[in-house]
Image: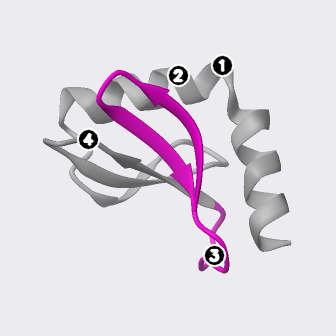
Amino acid sequence: MTTVTQLGKIRVSVYADDHNPPHFHVASPDADAVVRIRDLAVIGGDGTHDHIKVAIEWAREHREVIALAWIEMNG
């Protein structure tokens, strides 16, 4: 696992040898979700929690960073 960023209590991560489609994980003490990189759609977990929304807003501006982390970890 690579932590791409930490936004207070919110962690945005990419896992090695993970399944397609390319995605990232958002975790906080109160919420967990899996978000597809291509369109920032929540594909697993709770997409309604405010922590997930904060992470997705951050990802809008940093999608390239997340995509590069995915490629480095998963080819």
Give the residue pinned by disc 2: 58
Q: Whole-percent x and y of residue 73?
A: 76, 66
Q: Which element type, helix, strand or loop, lies under badge 2?
A: helix
Range drawn in magenta: 1-22
Mark closer to the observer (2, 3): 2
Measure the alpha-carbon separation of dots 1 and 3.
Answer: 22 Å
Measure the alpha-carbon separation of dots 4 and 2.
Answer: 15 Å
- Residue kind at label 1, given as amino acid type: Glu
- Residue kind at label 2, given as amino acid type: Trp
The numbered mark at residue 61 is 1
Mark closer to the observer (4, 3): 4
Q: Whole-percent x and y of residue 72?
A: 84, 60
Which residue is at a point 60% across and 25% down the rendered structure image? 60
4 or 1: tag closer to the N-terminus? 4
Label 2 Cα crowd, 10 Å radius (few <14 / some 14-19 / many 20+): some
- Residue kind at label 3, given as amino acid type: Asn
2 or 3: tag closer to the N-terminus? 3
Determine whether label 1 and label 2 are within 8 Å by CB. yes
- Residue kind at label 4, given as amino acid type: Ser
Determine whether label 4 and label 3 are within 8 Å by CB. no
Give the residue pinned by disc 3: 20
Determine whether label 4 and label 2 are within 8 Å by CB. no
Which residue is at a point 53% across and 50% down the rendered structure image? 13
Give the residue pinned by disc 4: 28
Q: Compared with residue 62, is residue 31 higher up or lower down, i.e. above or below?
A: below
